Image (spheres, grey):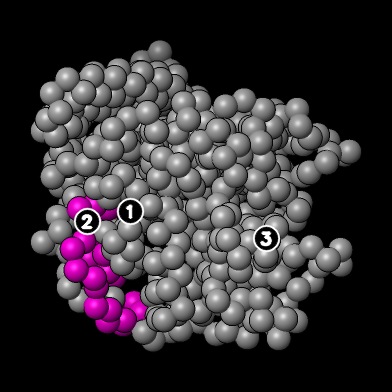
Amino acid sequence: MACTTILVGKDASYDGSTMIARNDDGHFDVKKVVVVEPDKQPKVYKSKIGKASIELPENPLRYTMIPNVDPSSGVWPASGVNSEGVGMTATETITSNPRVKGADPFVEKGGIGEEDLVLLVLPYIKSAREGIIRLGSLLEKYGTYEPNGIAFNDDKEVWWLESIGGHHWIARRVPDDRYVVMPNQFGLDNFDWDDAYGAKKDHMCSADLRTFVTTNHLDLNLNGEFNPRLAFGSAADSDHIYNTPRSWFMLRYFNPRTYKWDGPDADFTPESDDLPWSMVPEKKVTVEDVKYVLSSYYQGTEYNPFAKWGDPKKHGMYRPIGISRTSFMTCLQARPYAPKEIKTIEWLCMGTNAFNSFVALYPNVSKIPSYFSTTTMTVDSNKFYWANRLISLISDNNYAATSIHIERYQNKLQELCHAQIAKTDAKYLETKDLTVLEKGNEEMARIAKKETDKCLNNVLSAASNHMKTGYSRTDN
């Protein structure tokens, strides 16, 4: 699954929140948002792809997830928040190399993967750190059939885990004052073995990882410092077109003056293999920043596919972040200043990010509004997913005519989201009544539908005026 991830530590964000966000870039997979109550969580989970059968712990937590509407290939729960306010997004498909895969082959039968991970982990953890521990133990026991990166957050920490071969894994806590960018490529560029095998304050890994590295001659570093990206990752020609340009754009956005990003004497280019995994941003990161970079198609650069300037041969030469086939994107924002019941906000958008907008949902509820939760495989503009798919298709093919309507839609709905959060927060703090959150979500759905319908009408009208079959008497 080709995706893009950004992680934000609490001291790097605008309000002290931690944030984990990811585009889910499948094959135009139809998605919905649902709540799983403890009594609906299976006792024994059986996967469809890996054919794994796993007995699950007792007393699961309630959690949200974003499964495929079509269950034929499995659940694919993708992202969610549990009733303790812990967030998880799974997964960022990453890369590996033949040395790693030869030393620890993937587990094709009985292994676990993206189809399974949220369901197997999120209902059973009460912190981001616990998420790493549980997922790591599952990888060691069952193995995996694919390389993945997985993020967890609570209101104090963000953790990132990358799988290595069939049974190994490595994880780091995101430094509080930094953000992390991840395309579909192995990311970690430094690691402290002593901490991982000692206090485990900021680093964790599978029990035998250091021995695994030594035995299989995986350490390629010359300076004595261990770089996991060199040991476990890739630097293929395809990475330079498909993966590293995405990291370059995001780092360039958050740190425009820290390095020189453009020109013949640039410190880093879209094809650099040594782009930093994490950086301290030049300003604090907002939810709007996260939405912007995960919607990017290289605006302001000569690689923009819609550009009217620069070398036409470079337009669209790199894989966009906001790619056409995105199913959804979530930003899980854990707010340290809010009570546990309303601590985490699940920001959601669906369809191609370049042309959609966020909505803000409270995940600590027993049901999600039907606008988001009752999507079917039938195209229906009365559902958030399908309305945004239609907006995206029309706008992509009529960029000049529709871009102003997209900008207005995104700004207006984002504004209304913040207002609705403030209103619902205040009502909950006054009443301590959890039903306030469901009512707040229903109002958010009403607002989102109104603004989304308006945008769809506007782009449809604007694009209709540019149809090739258009003609009037004055045209002859």
| Residue 403 at x, y percent in the picture | 46, 24
Mark 1 and mark 2 residues within 8 Å of each other at the beta carbon: yes
Amino acid at pointer 2: Leu
The residue furthest top is 474
Mark linked to residue 464: none
| Residue 113 at x, y percent in the picture | 40, 71
Q: Secondary structure at mark 3?
A: loop
Residue 16, placed above or below residue 474: below
Q: Residue at x 65, y 45 (%)?
A: 278
Quadrant position of the C terminus in the picture: top left
Mark linked to residue 61: 2
The reply to whether residue 324 is visible in this rendering is no
Q: Residue at x 66, y 50 (%)?
A: 277
As measured in the structure, the alpha-carbon distance from the residue carrying label 1 to the one carrying label 3 is 25 Å
Residue 11, placed above or below residue 140: above
Q: Secondary structure at mark 1?
A: loop
Q: Quadrant of residue 301?
A: top right
Mark 1 and mark 3 residues within 8 Å of each other at the beta carbon: no
Front one among 390 and 272: 272
Amino acid at pointer 1: Lys
Q: Is residue 72 magenta?
A: yes
Q: Quadrant of residue 467?
A: top left
Residue 361, placed above or below residue 38: above
Which residue position is annotated with label 3?
A: 191
Give the mark nearest the N terminus, 1 or 2.
Answer: 2
Which residue position is annotated with label 1?
A: 126
Front one among 298 and 224: 224
